[in-house]
Amino acid sequence: MSTDKKLGTKIIHFGGEIDKTTGASSVPIYQASTFHHFSLDNPPEFDYSRSGNPTRQALEDYIALLEGGARGFAFASGMAAISSAFFLLSSGDHVICTEDVYGGTYRLLTAILTRMNIETTFVDMTDPEKVKAALKPNTKAVFLETPSNPTLKITDISVICAWAKENGLLTMLDNSFMTPYHQRPIEQGVDIVLHSATKFLSGHSDVLAGLAVVANESLGRRMKQIQNGLGNVLGPQDSWLLMRGMKTLKVRMEGSEQNARRLAEWLDSHPAVEAVYYPGLPGHPGREIHEKQSSGYGAVVSFDVNGGERARKLLSEVKIPLVAVSLGAVESILSYPAMMSHAAMSREVRLERGITDGLVRYSVGLEDIDDIIADLDAALSHLQG
Ligand SMILES: *Cc1c(COP(=O)(O)O)cnc(C)c1O
């Protein structure tokens, strides 16, 4: 696939959409752990499925094309992709990370990598000066997540990356909320893009997967060694299922975003709602920066209903969304960060980061928006008084 086509076309014609040997209309699921050596002198392209599998390879090439990177890697989960990227670091290294990072990444950095003698400083990345102030002699990497989870704060990707480059730091960015359809961080200077493909990329709440895309071939060789060495690869069936989901990325991202914009505006004027976090709202402090680096606002809207009791009541009253951990699916998903995705954080740290007891996160699906609003309106009416 030539790279001059528009993204919507690349999503469909990514190079692996036709099986090279039979012309079949999808990549076959190569359910094999190993590959026969027809000749010992000419070893086969694929040798053993941990090191490489044709179905997984098609997915890896697919995500590399969409992100505009040199090479892609598929992992067993988003956390497997993120933790593999951190294996590029060594004992004694220091990381600067956005403070309202995904809860699982926070747990990895604070409870696991600390034992490997990798330390992290969490900073408010909406202010580049705070990032610069966190630099230490042993700083090796900067981890960004924008919009952040669950408070949708915006980091200026190109400003942070330019500074990181000057200081020889590796940059990694969790792009799960935006997907390459709305935001391509490698074009803005990021070295490694990471995804929980469990979310918008797969889009149907039926596969757990992670993806990484690196900006250049030398990082590609290092990531390949890590993926093969850790063995946390995505299996061929899930690789196929993920590609199946990715083919509809454009219409799903557009449809759910359109719904999310309507929902955010409606919530913003609702008396039972204390605050709404959505980068598409006129009052969002990061809106201008977000618009500079992304082509859409995404489908995640967080809002504060003022107190844990009221949040619990809301979760028990809604009829349309799945009340669950996760996001980015055809169906709406309402989650409660304080008790779900960010339960690994102490209450004190959580409150410091704006993840209050009244904060809920609505991942807007593809249902009719009028029904989503009517459902929430009925649920919110039970909170009055
Ligand atoms: C869900 C999520 C992850 C973790 O991905 P898994 O596939 O659950 O391992 C990482 N980052 C973000 C932003 C997420 O939403």
Image (cartoon, rainbow, N blue to C red):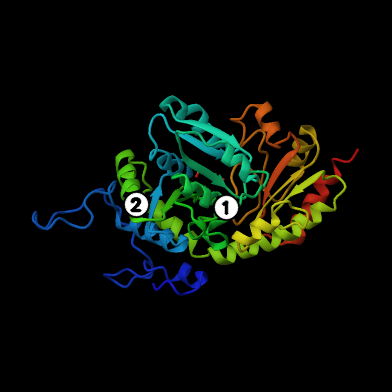
| Three-letter residue code for mark 1 | Val
In this view, the residue farthest toward the right is 385
Residue 339 sits above or below residue 73 on the image = above
Viewer-side residue, 149 vs 233:
149
Q: Quadrant of the C terminus?
A: top right
| Three-letter residue code for mark 2 | Gly
In this view, the residue farthest toward the top is 115
Residue drawn at x 45%, y 48% is 210
Q: How far across and how far down the image is residue 35, in percent?
A: 20, 53
> CB under 8 Å between callouts 2 and 1?
no
Viewer-side residue, 184 vs 134:
134
| Number of numbered callouts drawn | 2
* Visible residue check, residue 125: no
Q: Quadrant of residue 368?
A: bottom right
Label 1 packing within 10 angstroms: few (<14), some (14-19), many (20+)? few
Residue 234 sits above or below residue 330 on the image = above
Q: How far across and how far down the image is residue 228, in percent?
A: 30, 44
Q: Mark 2 — residue? A: 220
Residue drawn at x 66%, y 48% is 152
Residue drawn at x 40%, y 37% is 89
Give the structural element (helix, strand or loop) at label 1. Answer: helix
Q: Quadrant of residue 230?
A: top left
How far apart are the two marked residues, 2 and 1, measured between alpha carbons?
24 Å
Disc on the earlier residue, 2 or 1:
1
Q: Mark 1 — residue? A: 159
Q: Position of 335 compared to 222: left or right?
A: right
Q: How far across and how far down the image is residue 80, in percent?
A: 43, 41
Residue 194 sits above or below residue 24 on the image = above
Q: Position of 115 compared to 368: left or right?
A: left
